[in-house]
Image (cartoon, rainbow, N blue to C red):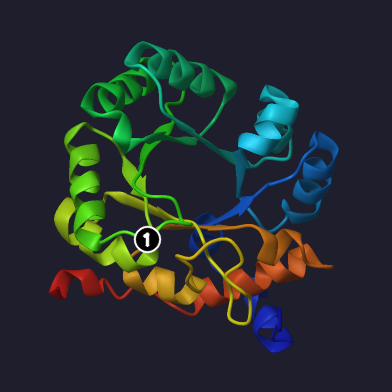
């Protein structure tokens, strides 16, 4: 990835808002590797995604490790089971200190309501519950994604996982407060690899995405902190235009 040193230098005063929008994916096979990465990024990154690979390898210790560095955890396990099982899983995740998690919208209304009820039942901090509309390796039409988002909102979910190309339509249909988390973020110059539905950080913010998930363009770099700061600079350069309002 080509980085612009002047932009990163200027980022020394980037707003907290930009930092809060970036979620770094910890796609590692071991807790030790993930912990090394979090240790390097924690000074500039607030959010980290713990997915199936790391959680299978390390379990709740992965969540505890991120929290020990002062980070927030997005638990990306895409719960898709019977309502009672999803309810228990969401409650368990909340007790671990997870701040955000997701469930498959394809599970249906009963599953979605079980997930949000579990979050709301917690006596401590309640995790944000997001619905998975479509995987970033898939192709689908905007209308189908918006329909899924409407269902998620009707069931009380806080937002959805969706690509930037659907963000504006989702905001228009579900409201500005409805969260859109966008994976498949690739800075200019990075190949799309196994994710077809990719976009740049600045473009995603302009379209209405609230949080951006970035993995290899940061974690595979020789200097991941510098790479993260470059992504943050791109986020900072693109204040939200709320273009969805005019569509």
In front of the other: 215 or 73: 215
Q: Residue at x 73, y 40 (%)?
A: 69
Q: Position of residue 48 (x, y in %)?
A: 62, 46
Splitting the image into 4 quarters, where does residue 229 fall? bottom right
The secondary structure type at the circle numbered 1 is: loop
Q: Residue at x 47, y 72 (%)?
A: 199
Q: Residue at x 68, y 28 (%)?
A: 56
In front of the other: 237 or 160: 160
Residue at the disc numbered 1:
139
Splitting the image into 4 quarters, where does residue 49 fall? top right
Can residue 98 be seen here? yes
* Rendered position, 73 above or below 201: above
Classify the position of the N terminus by image quarter: bottom right
Q: How many marks?
A: 1
Q: Position of residue 114 (x, y in %)?
A: 30, 19
Q: Residues within 10 Å of mark 1 (few under 14, many from 20)?
A: few
Q: Position of residue 12 (x, y in %)?
A: 67, 73
Q: Position of residue 90 (x, y in %)?
A: 45, 22
């Amino acid at each position: 990835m080509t980085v612009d040193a002047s932009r990163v230098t200027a980022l020394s005063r980037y707003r907290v808002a930009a930092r809060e929008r970036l979620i770094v994916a910890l796609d590692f096979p071991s807790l030790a590797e993930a912990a090394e990465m979090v240790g390097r990024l924690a000074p500039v990154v607030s959010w980290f995604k713990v997915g199936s690979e790391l959680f299978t390898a390390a379990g709740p210790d992965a969540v505890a490790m991120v929290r020990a560095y002062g980070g927030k955890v997005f638990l990306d396990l895409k719960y898709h089971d019977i309502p009672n099982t999803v309810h228990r899983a969401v409650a368990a995740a909340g007790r671990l200190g997870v701040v955000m998690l997701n469930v498959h919208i394809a599970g249906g209304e009963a599953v979605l309501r079980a997930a949000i009820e579990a979050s709301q039942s917690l006596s401590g901090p309640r995790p944000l519950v997001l619905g998975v509309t479509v995987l970033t390796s898939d192709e689908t039409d905007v209308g189908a994604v918006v329909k899924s988002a409407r269902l998620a909102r009707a069931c009380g979910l806080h937002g959805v996982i969706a690509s930037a190309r659907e963000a504006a339509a989702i905001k228009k249909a579900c409201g500005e407060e409805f969260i859109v988390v966008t994976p498949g973020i690739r800075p200019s110059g990075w190949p799309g690899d196994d994710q077809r539905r990719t976009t740049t950080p600045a473009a995603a913010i302009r379209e209405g995405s609230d949080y951006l998930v970035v993995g290899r363009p940061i974690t595979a770099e020789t200097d991941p902190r510098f790479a993260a700061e470059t992504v943050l600079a791109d986020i900072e350069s693109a204040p939200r235009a709320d273009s969805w309002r005019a569509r």
